[in-house]
């Protein structure tokens, strides 16, 4: 199965509106000639509409960092999947470890968000990953197993055809510590067979599994060269268009 790699930038809580627009414009110019790689950036909610205008019709697609699972209503401070789609969003990052850690997200709420995204045609990027202590206690695979099976509970292969998984070991996020090639290969292989066992071999074959955690221009080629790694979810290094383009061009 030929899976088009996805290089996705998670801008987290960085950049004002004008800064986001400026970075998006730079990136659009830099990746005008990129082929065979899909590119996505996820600005803050506040910058989405402005960035949407910049990337429309270009090689860069738009993502959101979160959504709320209800369609509309008295949910102060929240944004629905439909509102995002209406603003030009294509991908939704769901269940990022920072949301699990700082905002109390659980596999149950994450699963509802995945369903809400799918319902309006947004492509969900489900983030999973173990903490350092879970790895030390050899719980990595059981943690991932639970995050995937509970996060996707009640969904079938057909509904999940646009799913993207992002393996982000928590100890590698923003720390400069990247998981080793062997560790990444082992986990990605495990996740692919998990998808086959839980759903179908078709879904397992077609689902892109991204790696995230201190991806930089210097390590992108080695990480992207690992079997079963179909792209990257990049934090810090995606904030600078010149760095990000060098990750996008990992193959050249
Ligand atoms: P860093 O690339 O800054 O480690 O962040 C990874 C991440 O959390 C992307 O979602």
Image (cartoon, grey):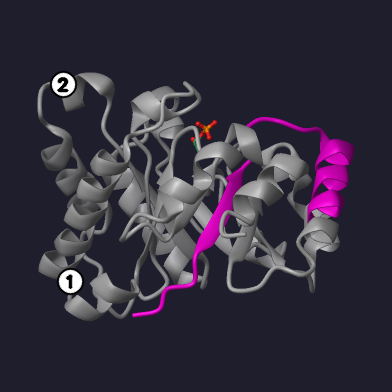
Residue 112 in picture, x, y percent from top left: 35, 54
Disc 1 to disc 2: CB gap under 8 Å? no
Left or right position of 206 against 233: left
| Magenta stretch encompasses residue 15 | yes
Q: Which numbered disc covers residue 136?
A: 2
9 in relation to 91, above or below: above
Which residue is label 1 attached to?
A: 199
Q: Residue at x 10, y 22 (%)?
A: 137
Callout 2 crowding tier (Cα within 10 Å): few <14, some 14–19, many ≥20: few
- Residue 36 occupies which quadrant of the picture? bottom right
- Count the marks: 2
Q: Residue at x 40, y 43 (%)?
A: 95
Residue 238 in picture, x, y percent from top left: 65, 41
Residue 196 in picture, x, y percent from top left: 16, 69
Camera sees residue 205 = yes
Q: Residue at x 14, y 41 (%)?
A: 141
Callout 1 crowding tier (Cα within 10 Å): few <14, some 14–19, many ≥20: some
Q: Nearer the viewer, residue 25 or 221?
A: 221
| Magenta stretch encompasses residue 100 | no
Q: Nearer the viewer, residue 123 or 118?
A: 123
For the C terminus, the quadrant is bottom right
Q: Earlier in the sequence, mark 1 or mark 2?
A: 2
């Amino acid at each position: 199965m030929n899976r088009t790699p996805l290089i996705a930038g998670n801008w987290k809580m960085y950049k004002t509106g004008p800064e986001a627009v400026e970075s998006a414009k730079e990136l659009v110019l830099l990746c005008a000639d990129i082929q065979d790689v899909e590119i996505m950036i996820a600005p803050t909610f506040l910058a989405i509409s402005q960035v949407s205008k910049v990337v429309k019709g270009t090689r860069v697609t738009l993502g959101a960092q979160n959504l709320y699972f209800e369609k509309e209503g008295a949910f102060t401070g929240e944004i629905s999947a439909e509102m995002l789609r209406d603003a030009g969003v294509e991908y939704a990052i769901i269940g990022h470890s920072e949301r699990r850690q700082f905002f109390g997200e659980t596999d149950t709420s994450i699963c509802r968000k995945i369903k809400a995204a799918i319902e309006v045609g947004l492509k969900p990027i489900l983030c999973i990953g173990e903490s350092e202590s879970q790895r030390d206690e050899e719980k990595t695979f059981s943690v991932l197993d639970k995050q995937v099976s509970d996060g996707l509970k009640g969904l079938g292969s057909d509904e999940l055809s646009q799913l993207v998984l992002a393996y982000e070991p928590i100890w590698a996020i923003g720390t400069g510590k990247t998981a080793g090639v062997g560790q990444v290969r082992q986990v990605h292989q495990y996740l692919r067979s998990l998808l086959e066992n839980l759903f179908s071999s078709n879904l397992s074959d077609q689902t892109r599994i991204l790696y995230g955690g201190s991806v930089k221009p210097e390590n992108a080629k080695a990480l992207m060269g690992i079997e079963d790694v179909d792209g990257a979810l990049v934090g810090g290094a995606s904030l600078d268009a010149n760095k990000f383009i060098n990750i996008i061009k990992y193959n050249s």
